[in-house]
Image (spheres, rainbow, N blue to C red):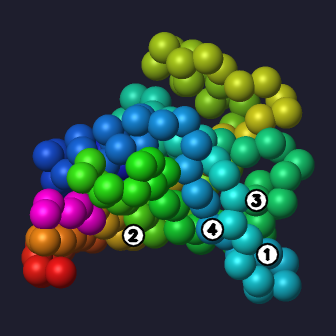
Amino acid sequence: MASWKQFVDDAPDLAARVRARFEATSQHVLATRTLTGSPRVSGTEVGFAGDEAWIGSASRSGKSMDLRLDPRFVLHSNPGDGSMTSGDVKIDGTARGSSADDALRIGAAGAEAPDESFRLFWIDLTRVALTTVDGESVRTETWRPGTGVHVHEQVR
């Protein structure tokens, strides 16, 4: 498990491109596990404050309850126009619930602090993958804590 800061420190170029993908649109796709063990797919916001990344949720939503019971998730960047020229990101990780002080941290980072109906979850990373398509070439860059970036290229 690693923080967003650890990812940035270990793979700054990849982290910058991943962040740009999440900042390109406001809604992304989050997969969580329900109380019964079934998967749940929901839209979510992704943001950055200081050295951390977060996902957002309505306080009483299913995904918020899911993450409180089982913090594991998979986050998928908005696919945009589907061309994948700017990349397709998938992050595996765990979520940590926010505290009352987090609204102050968000505000200090220049973002709008959420109200009580909104819940933040700070994310820790177990795997980050960025896949891009350039003509007939598919390139996947995968980062895991302690192993650095592994690149796999193939022709379609």
Q: Verify CB contact (< 8 Å) between mark 2 and mark 1.
A: no
Circle 3 — which element? helix
Circle nearer the N terminus (3, 1): 1
Label 4 packing within 10 angstroms: few (<14), some (14-19), many (20+)? many
Residue in the image at 61% along x and 17% along y = 112
The magenta stretch is: 131-135
The x, y position of residue 37, in whole percent, is 77, 85
Circle nearer the N terminus (4, 2): 4
Q: Amino acid at mark 2?
A: Thr
Q: Which residue is mark 3?
A: 63
Residue in the image at 54% along x and 18% along y = 111
Q: Which residue is mark 1?
A: 34
Circle nearer the N terminus (3, 4): 4
Circle 1 — which element? loop
Q: Which residue is mark 2?
A: 126
Q: Is residue 8 left or right of residue 1?
A: left
Circle 2 — which element? strand
How far is disc 4 from disc 1 in space, using C-alphas? 10 Å
- Overall secondary structure of the magenta section: strand
Q: Amino acid at mark 4?
A: Ala
Q: Verify CB contact (< 8 Å) between mark 2 and mark 3.
A: no
Q: Which residue is mark 4?
A: 31
In the image, is residue 147 above or below residue 84?
below
The x, y position of residue 106, in whole percent, is 56, 24
How far is disc 4 from disc 2 in space, using C-alphas? 15 Å
